[in-house]
């Protein structure tokens, strides 16, 4: 029988140094939503233009 270690999740306020990783999550989410309901969500390309560092700050 194998045992697994519990995963630890840490929740913290985002910092500007986190932008690149968070932008990747944003864009994956945008892609998913657009694929599910293209008439209700903007395309990932359109959303990518809005996912900039200034907006993140």
Image (cartoon, grey):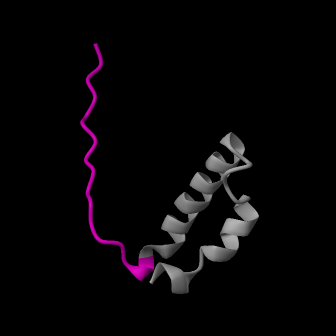
Q: Is residue 45 left or right of residue 47?
A: right
Measured along the vertical axis of the image, is residue 15 above or below residue 7?
Answer: below
Seen at 53% across and 87% down, the residue is 54
Measured along the vertical axis of the image, is residue 12 above or below residue 49?
Answer: above
Depth check: give the residue in front, 43 or 10. 43
Seen at 50% across and 66% down, the residue is 21
Task: Indicate the position of residue 44 as horizontal and vertical percent values.
Answer: 71, 60
Q: Which residues are magenta?
A: 1-17
Seen at 68% across and 69% down, the residue is 48
Whether the magenta-drawn stretch holds residue 13 is answered as: yes
Q: Quadrant of residue 46?
A: bottom right
Depth check: give the residue in front, 28 or 42. 42
Seen at 63% across and 46% down, the residue is 32
Depth check: give the residue in front, 50 or 25. 50
- Marker count (numbered): 0
Q: Is residue 36 left or right of residue 7?
A: right
Task: Indicate the position of residue 49 as horizontal and vertical percent values.
Answer: 69, 75
Q: Main secondary structure of the magenta part?
A: loop
Task: Indicate the position of residue 10 as horizontal and vertical percent values.
Answer: 26, 57
- Quadrant showing the N terminus: top left
Q: Is residue 55 left or right of residue 11?
A: right
């Amino acid at each position: 029988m194998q045992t697994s270690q519990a995963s630890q999740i840490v929740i913290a306020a985002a910092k500007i140094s986190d932008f690149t990783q968070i932008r990747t999550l944003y864009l994956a989410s945008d892609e998913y939503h657009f694929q599910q309901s293209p008439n209700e969500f903007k395309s990932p390309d359109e959303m990518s233009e809005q996912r900039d560092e200034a907006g993140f700050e």
